[in-house]
Image (spheres, rainbow, N blue to C red):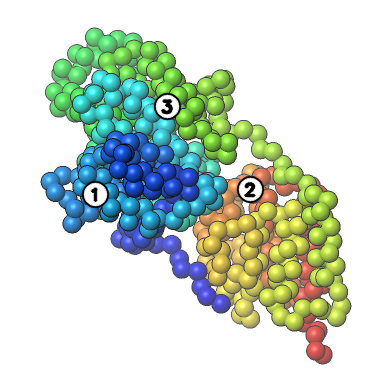
Amino acid sequence: MSTAKPLPRSLEGWIKHLDSVRLPVPTAAHEKVRRALGDSRRSLRDIADLTQESPALALSLLREANAAGNLLSSPAESLEVALTRLGLKRAEVLLNRLPAVAEEEIPQSLRQLQLIGQHAAQQANGLFAFRLARLWQEIHWCSLLFLSPLWPLLASHPELFDSWEKRVLGEGEAAAKVERELLGLPLLRLCQALAEHWKLPDWIIQGYRLLSDDRRLLVEALHIARDNEHPLHQQQQLDANPTLSRWLTQPGNTVLLANGLAVSAHVGWGGGHSLRWQRLTGLFMKMPLDELQQLVHQQAAQSGRNHARDDLWHPAQALLWPWNQHRLRREPVAAPVPTASALEDWRRHCGELIRDPSPFTNVVQLSACTRDALQSGGMSRVLVMLADRNHSRLLAQQQAGLSKEANGLQLDPGQSQVLRRLLAQPGQLRLGPDNLVQFSALLPGQLKILFPGDHLLLRSLAVNGRVAMLVVADQGGAPFADFSLRAFAKTAQCIERALASFARRGR
């Protein structure tokens, strides 16, 4: 069995890994841009406007234009400049190298982050582009692409975003701790390094440098921005600090402000993060907070009309909610009961498992039936692992509903107290909000990445008193349905009978 390649843990490893990822482009947008590139009547402005429907394509064109061999004087700050440097023929060649896929087949977390970028671009256009009309293209494209260093990460490992969002935004865990556990390094450091490696526009790089390396100016500005009701006093404080005053007037700050507004609104309009970015934007624009909030909400609504998708979250949806409500803190809903058709499949698979003599000629067939029985019984994510003779390794044999990292996964029980106990004797561990904190640190990081959520089942199964198999399953991280818990217990009994029958074959 092949071993799944572990995720990088160093900055150099991540850059090399993510640099090779080809971002998917929605088929409709891919076709529109392809036709436009071949239409001599189209201007560069027309092509650039069409390209923004696919942020991944915009990033690919900008990266190519800013590559070492194409760098004329400074990085291209807009897509029109990038298209001019590349030429339409080369842009078409680059477009044809990118995979065109149906929009629903692109990882949801990637599309969600690109939606946040589109919301940020709308905020930047509405708040700043009119005031700084000469720089509107730079403001627009840098705002749209500010989060782009994360796109290849989510295209290749979408489960990481789900886990990060759940733990950091939903449960309030420290971002630095979660990021070191998931990636091996801080997320902002990785974003800055990728932005520099790709030679993205300077405003994007400056924003990440400010967030990761030089927060002093940002903290000082936020402190002054809190006193939004006294603009004269604010101006006096800025006059007393010329360095801060000069920094605050830099147009490149519009990119960071627009993304701060969009990302914080994604978390919740009434949270402290959203209020801080609104105050800071008000200080930048010399505008009272209530007027600024009205503009921000108008731009969010406009972005919602232009960019919202049924299966994605847009903060404009929450503008009618009470501001103390939080999208990620709503009461969890128990997973649904399996359908009648699924239950029929479940009974059939369980019937196969308990047949004697065993109908299976090898372990692969037995474990596949195990996976199918668990899934049809209500478990949406399933991992079936086999233990070696010495209980020194657990090898992934079957999976359902998980990312490709689950294929060929190997775990070392010696690194996890929970796994050692489950291998010592058959047993079950059910994780939920009441005991998750107690046991989470004792679970392998690979399992937590594959199964983000508050609810998880781990069960070890034995043959002749010796554990041979470990099953990990959940219902998408949602609270378990009572029926599915009973079906899981019954399925586990059938699996143990199957293991015993399989062990007696040929005797």
According to the image, label 2 marks what residue? 477
Q: Residue tagged by mark 1?
A: 87
Q: Residues within 10 Å of mark 2 (few under 14, many from 20)?
A: some
Distance from Cα at disc 2 to Cα at disc 3: 28 Å
- Residue at the limit of the structure toward the bottom, as seen here: 507
Q: Image point 34% across, 47% down: which residue?
A: 38
**What is the three-letter code of the residue carrying label 3?**
Ser
Quarter of the image that includes the N terminus: bottom right
Q: Horizontal and vertical percent for residue 28?
A: 48, 45
Above or below: residue 375 compared with residue 409: above
Task: Give, as a three-letter code, the residue at label 2.
Answer: Gly
Q: Can residue 255 be seen here?
A: no
Task: Check contact, mark 1 vs mark 2: CB within 8 A.
Answer: no
On the rendered structure, is 136 left or right of 488?
left
Q: Quadrant of residue 320?
A: top right
User: Residue at 64% of width from left, 44% of height from top?
Assistant: 433
